[in-house]
Image: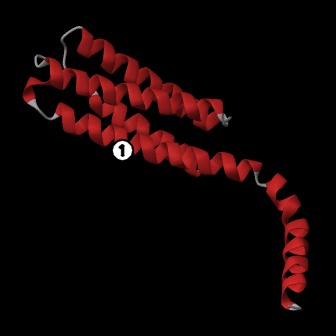
Amino acid sequence: MTTKPYRLTVAAVVLLTAAPLFTACKNADQALDCGKRAISITGDVQDLMDSAINVGQITDDSKRKHTLDALRKIGEDVRRIRESGSGDKLDKATDKLSKAVDNAQNDINNGKQPDLGAVAGAAGEVATACGSA
């Protein structure tokens, strides 16, 4: 029975000691969130590439929809990264990715083959920028 009060005291001391660390970790939390979004973007780019490998992705409505859905997901992740706050390098990378996604969506909507290499390259820049944020 005497160990319970001791454990509670130790837990309280640990929490009080660590409290300043939680407030100092706001930037670390932002970097972690950015990293999670970058991982999500990587998965979305993989989905995009998988859907676009098919030769008929522009003419087949279901394949075109899947490609547009993947581009939409990437755009949503970019918006979330921007909302969480970022630095100059990350702002430039997300701007580039957003533009590449918009261009790819416009190409698909106009029946053209999208430049998915630009999307993948820009997504890599976002991941690099998140790593240095």
Q: Is residue 116 left or right of residue 16?
A: left
Q: Is residue 12 left or right of residue 70?
A: right
Residue 100 drawn above or below residue 131: above
Q: Residue visible at 24% across and 37% down?
A: 49
Secondary structure at numbered mark 1: helix
Residue 73 drawn above or below residue 24: above
Q: Can residue 133 be seen in this snapshot? A: no
Q: Which residue is mark 1?
A: 43
Q: Residue visible at 29% across and 22% down?
A: 68
Quadrant position of residue 70: top left
Q: Nearer the viewer, residue 55 or 100?
A: 55
Quadrant position of residue 63: top left
Few, some or many residues within 10 Å of mark 1 (<14, 14–19, 20+) = some
Q: Residue visible at 83% across and 61% down?
A: 21
Quadrant position of residue 34: top right
Percent position (x, y) of residue 4? 84, 84
Q: Can residue 21 be seen in this snapshot? A: yes
Q: Residue visible at 85% across and 91% down?
A: 1
**Residue kind at label 1, given as amino acid type:** Gly
Percent position (x, y) of residue 2? 89, 91
Outermost residue toward the bottom in this view: 2
Percent position (x, y) of residue 20? 88, 59
Outermost residue toward the front in this view: 1
Outermost residue toward the left in this view: 55
Percent position (x, y) of residue 101? 38, 24
Residue 7 drawn above or below residue 93: below
Q: Is residue 20 left or right of residue 120?
A: right
